[in-house]
Image (tube, rainbow, N blue to C red):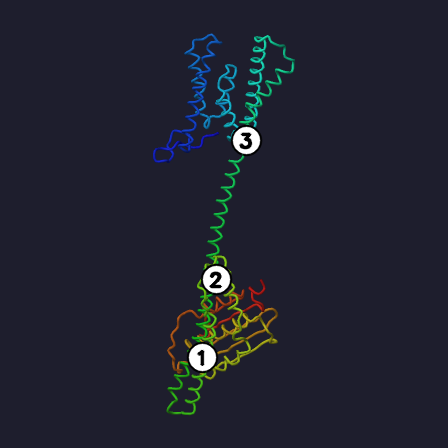
Amino acid sequence: MTATGAHQDAAGGPARGWWWGRRRSAVLDIGLGLVSALECGLEGVGFAGEAGVPVPVGVLFGLAAGSVLTLRRRWPIVVVLVSIATTPAEMGFLLGIVGLYTLAASEVPRRITALLAGMSSAAVFLVTVVRFRQEMQRAEEFEPLGWYVPLVALIMTLGLNAPPLLFGLYIGARRRLMESLRERADSLEQELSLLADRAEERAQWARQEERTRIAREMHDVVAHRVSLMVVHAAALQAVALKDPQKAVKNAALVGDMGRQALTELRSMLGVLREEAPAAGPEPVPLAAVGRAAAAAAAEAASEDGPCLDALEELVEQSRQAGAVVELTVLGEPCRYAAEVERTAYRVVQEALTNVHKHAAGAKVVVRLAHREGEVAMQVENGPSDAGAADAQLPSGGNGLVGMRERVNRLGGVFVSGPTDAGGFRVSAVLPAESRDAAA
């Protein structure tokens, strides 16, 4: 096996200078090295007698060869080569078995593993054949057949080398599979975390879109109705003593507009009101929250509201407030998507509200054009009448921004700005079908 890191210190963490990743691995390898060194040292006594060298030399040779097993995780190839080299000396039984297992389980290329396994098997086979023939000759009890000795040597070779080699291959494949599964699990966890973040972002975006839509609707309803109420109240104050009949009429108009404003506000607030669950809230996945919020926004956006049919009434309300408003309709009227008609109505409504706020007494021209595949509207007012009384209506600066957001959301075009005559112009072009509906 290749190096896996460093051995652990007293605190359990890895320390530099070694290759063991865990203390248990270090204890196991050192223990195997001691047992192997002891085995080879004992077998070195017999090797010294056969080789004709002093016994201490044979013992030292065995101890040195057997202790190499401690390096099996760092250099498995070296361990197998040492076991092959000591095979003729008939030592290193544990060294050969553990070395082959470690080599097969490591990340060493399979070509090298097959080559070393073949060399080890060949060495064991040849040594077994030679030793067995020598034993047969010494015994002189019977003459074995020609195939008997090779067959016995082959069985012994397979018995010694095949189990550790196959078991090592199995452990290596299992380890690689587990690492692959862990990597896939980590990857899936990261993907789930990313999906959760995206779901949270989508939910946040849907909530923000809904808040923005409600803010636009509230601004349009309150600003327009209340602006007209303030204008009528100012007129009522001016004519209360001079023309009681007109004062009564203006008072009735103020009451009607207040009731209309309350009705629209109630309908909008009713959409926001939700029934509390009887059994208590239950945890909802983030993705479901995002989908529910987006669906609620889409459903709320598709509800019925003011349409182009009510444009004449809208203009008439401004006329009743004292403004001079001219309405021009071009093309053949037709029905559009509910969101398109409502947006067109709100654009004209907000433009008229801005006239009441910033251009009291100015003449206003409202143009509505029905074209092929789109509807266009334009509200243009002249300069403010200096003799007209200013209603002193506050301005939040959100009217043009809300109109632009409405039009852009449907894929339309919005343009606004002052005119050369000193007035102001608001123009918008909307597709006959909203972009969301087309999608």
Q: Earlier in the sequence, mark 2 or mark 3?
A: 3
Q: Secondary structure at mark 3?
A: helix
**Residue shown at 42%/83% (left/top)?**
232
Tell which residue pokes out farthest to the front in this image: 141
Give how far apart the Cα atoms at labels 2 and 3 are.
Answer: 54 Å
In depth, the one of 238 and 301 nearer the eye is 301
In this picture, residue 19 sits left or right of residue 430: left
Q: Position of residue 207 (x, y in %)?
A: 46, 63
Which circle marks residue 362 in the picture? Answer: 1
Occupied quadrant, residue 212: bottom left
| Amino acid type, label 3 | Leu
Q: Are marks 2 and 3 in contact (CB under 8 Å)?
A: no
Give me the disc on residue 169: 3
Query: Would you name the residue on which mark 2 appears?
Result: 206
Tags 3 and 1 touching, CB below 8 Å: no
Q: Nearer the viewer, mark 3 or mark 1?
A: 3
Looking at marks 2 and 1 on the same chain, the residue that comes earlier in the sequence is marked by 2
Q: Residue at x 47, y 53 (%)?
A: 196
What is the secondary structure assignment of the residue under circle 2?
A: helix
Q: CA distance from mark 3 to mark 1?
A: 92 Å
Residue located 57% across and 65% down the image? 437
The Cα–Cα distance between marks 2 and 1, rounded to whole angstroms, is: 40 Å
Q: Earlier in the sequence, mark 3 or mark 1?
A: 3
Q: Is residue 378 above or below residue 53?
A: below
* Residue type, label 1: Ala
Of 43 and 62, nearer the camera is 43
The amino acid pointed to by label 2 is: Ala
Are the residues flagged by discs 2 and 1 in contact, CB closer than 8 Å? no
